[in-house]
Amino acid sequence: MPRLASLIVAIACASLARAQEPIDKDDVAARGAATGRLSVRVRVIKTVPQQATVRINWRRGGEGLSGTVVRGAFSTSDTKPQLPLGVWTEWVSLKEIVGTAKGWEFPSVVVTSEPIIKGKSTAPGATLSDVVVEFEFAEEGKVFRQFAEPAPKGATVGFAFPGSVLASRVTPEFSTQLNGLSTHARLRRERLEKAFPEPSPLPKQFAIIGHMGGYGEGPPGVRGSHGFGVRHNNPAILLEEFRTLSLLGVNGMVDSVKLADAAGVGAQFRRIFWGPPGSGDPMAFFQKSGKVVEMPDGCPFDPTLKPYMRERVAKAIQEHRAAAAKESWGLWDDEMGVYAKEHIAHCDRCAEVFREYLKSNQVSLEQLGAKSWNDVKPYSLWLSEAETKNKKAFPTGLRPAPETAADSLRYYYTYRLMSHANGQVFTEAAKTFADAGIKLYAMQGPTPSWNGASLDWHEFYDRKPNTAFVFETSNRDARVWQWESYLADIGRGIAQRHDLAQGCLVKPHRGAPAQRMLSVIARGTTAFEWYTFGPDYSKGDSFSQSPELLEQVARAVRFLGRAEPYLYGATFEKKPEVAFVTPRSSEIWSKVTDPSLAAFENAKWVYLALRHAHIPLDVISEQQLSEGMLNQYKVIYVPGPHLHHKSANALREWVRNGGSVWTDAAGLSRDEANQPAAEMNEMLGLSERKLETWGSVAQYRAAKLEPLTEANPPTAAAISWEKATVPARIAREPLSPSTAEPLARFSDGKAAVTRNRFGKGEAIVAGFWSGLTYSATVRRSDFNMRSDFDPAIRDMIARTALARNVYRPAIPSDPLVEAIALRKDGQRSVALINWSYAHSETATNKASLQSLENLRIELPGFADAKSVRSIQHGPLKLVNGAVLLPKLDEIDLLVIE
Ligand SMILES: [Zn+2]
């Protein structure tokens, strides 16, 4: 998505190209040579009004597609740019027009009427429409393909060049796929229709969003203007694409409902409208004229921002009303980052807000080591531009951790203030939109599944800036696709806390579209976009060019159509009895104390291990923990060394009253100011906390999961658990029990896992990065998820919850099958999601799904069930409280009656 600037787009485009690249380098060379042997010529056979001569320009790339725009013009054989109607141009090498064409290329051809009068000024030409262009393609002079492409509403046509199927010579497959856009779009629709001959209900309640583009009406404009992003002027193409969108279950539009109207199908695409203010952020207000910068120096608390935002909101509301959809959501900011970083340290207004913020968090002057509030200033977190240029020395862009407790406290709260500042920017806008019946959302990148972010979701939404929570799926590595469940569980908690609608951008070309869809829907998502259809000739990072993905998506929505009565508006069947605390304080401090961010990386895998053990979880913030209200929980998992002291106090009281808390390496050893949390030692029953580290983990960010790096792992670090022996990975914390009892030991006899009775409850500490250790094997290049997750490590993580007999309503026999028990209007169901992939060199995303046969699913949460029916397989026999599912591919839903 656009805002994280060109870098992300560049990565996206690069990898799109990568997916289409052949494995063999010889193929690339052969293809390059093959393209060099191809040429094309065109002629214009019709224009309205009729012209004696025309000019014919071409362009490719840019304007929403990858790369920059490359332009050229056809000419006569004697190199004149004016071409009589009906006369062929000179042959042009296709290499010139399509470039290297590793994948698809979609060049546009624009016919203009501009006459050239030598020596005099150029008069504007007539406005052309109803233009028809004929194409002829030849290989080494021999014509192999011809077609005509009409532009009824203008003078722009385009063609699709299937670079990915071009071998060393032109093949029938290549020739069949080389088409004008009208045929390209029609074949797409026909192929998909053929794949699903049986009628099947599509979702009516879920809002499924699609994107459309590339169509424009009228001429490309006067000289210099080429109709930005317009790839054709043919309503018939639009109609084909909208028919394809319908087959994908799409019933709402982002940005472009007018195009559905132009195709004559507007009524079918008004279930929802995702519209303005748009992907830019309100801080654009502070952009100085001239160079646009990523983060303009403005103050998010500046009162002059408010009138500007009110104006934007009023305008957006009008656009939403004009779109006249059944439901309207406004996007404001795409892949939201924080709006002020170093600004905060130098702004008097921010300093004032900071002092109020500290007071509202009951921070005292004494803690800050200050005599007067006037002396309290935000901490300068970020290195100056000159300092950051020295990237090698300062990889994070952050200053080193402060030395004193008082400075550390300021550091911590300044860090948090960044998210707080973003949140308050939108509070008024969200309310104005809500009064107009429009939801407001920021599109969040999946940062909690990456290496974190300056912006904290919990802190941001606590300011009530939005009325809908939306994130995008982006992770490319099959091994972490289930982190979608982590993100959606965080979102579910936030949505429940603030009564928000939930939406998602599901990216089919990132893999597992059906699983991702069901994962977010089972957690309350009612609106999602298949991001992004494109179409391929109009938008990069799209999936419409892939027949395989179109079929996967169409299959997923056909499932959803049948499952909709049980899924739309469904909630968890029962509240989870286990909470998982997001490690925000640990994230903040890890960034300046541990370059590999081990605590943060570890936590994501702890979550997964618990899900692999089929334990339903509430993901909560430290703030929520400090607010108490923990009585529904039997067990709370708090991974990470740092925890706010108020959260720690609440946790201790809850344990004293009978709760079980679990943590692992260095867990709960420090407070929000990065100071030793000695008072937690009593609860944990430990006397000293010390981590021994011999390796590192690479921070995960969207792309490939890397192996752990270990130098000379000590032999002493193996843990005996039941009958297994498991080496702790990259680090260990030999535990020093004071009152705790060891449950497991390292091979040198030191305590590896301890339990301490505290009041009526207990505290369990695993003295190693249990999540990272759990992930160690699957990090190999030829991974197999079904065999790479060690059940002994999973058990070390999950045992605390299992021993408390926590609510586990549905237990598939395979850990990689996620089960989510749901309830809707008294109807109960269990969503089943198969996340199990194995490495495959030839498969899309280098991973192939491992289907399961005869999957046994125990249903202890449904002891009163009379019958169980699978959406995919029909009635199942219920024997001893379990069913046998004959086959599970991507997803299924068990309906319990
Ligand atoms: Zn400021």
Image (tube, rainbow, N blue to C red):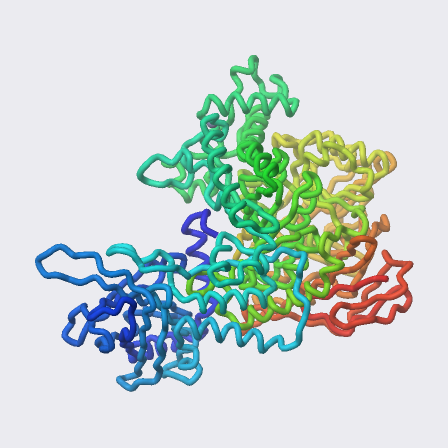
x and y, in percent, of residue 423 in the image? 57, 35
- What residue is shown at x 49% (from left), y 52% (from top)? 255
Total numbered labels placed on residues in the image: 0
Asked whether residue 185 appears in the rendered view, the answer is yes
Is 142 above or below relative to 224? below
Left or right of 349 on screen, residue 371: right
- What residue is shown at x 73% (from left), y 46% (from top)? 618
Point out the residue furthest to the left here. Answer: 119
The front one of 759 and 538 is: 538
x and y, in percent, of residue 773 in the image? 66, 54
Q: Determine which quarter of the picture holds residue 353.
A: top right
Q: Quadrant of the C terminus?
A: bottom right
- What residue is shown at x 54% (from left), y 76% (from top)? 191
Asked whether residue 771 appears in the rendered view, the answer is no
- What residue is shown at x 53% (from left), y 19% (from top)? 376
Point out the residue furthest to the top here. Answer: 371
The front one of 332 and 759 is: 332
The front one of 562 and 873 is: 562
Q: Determine which quarter of the picture holds residue 582.
A: top right
Point out the residue furthest to the front here. Answer: 49
Left or right of 261 on screen, residue 107: left
x and y, in percent, of residue 698 in the image? 54, 52
x and y, in percent, of residue 51 in the image? 23, 69
Q: Determine which quarter of the picture holds residue 432.
A: top right
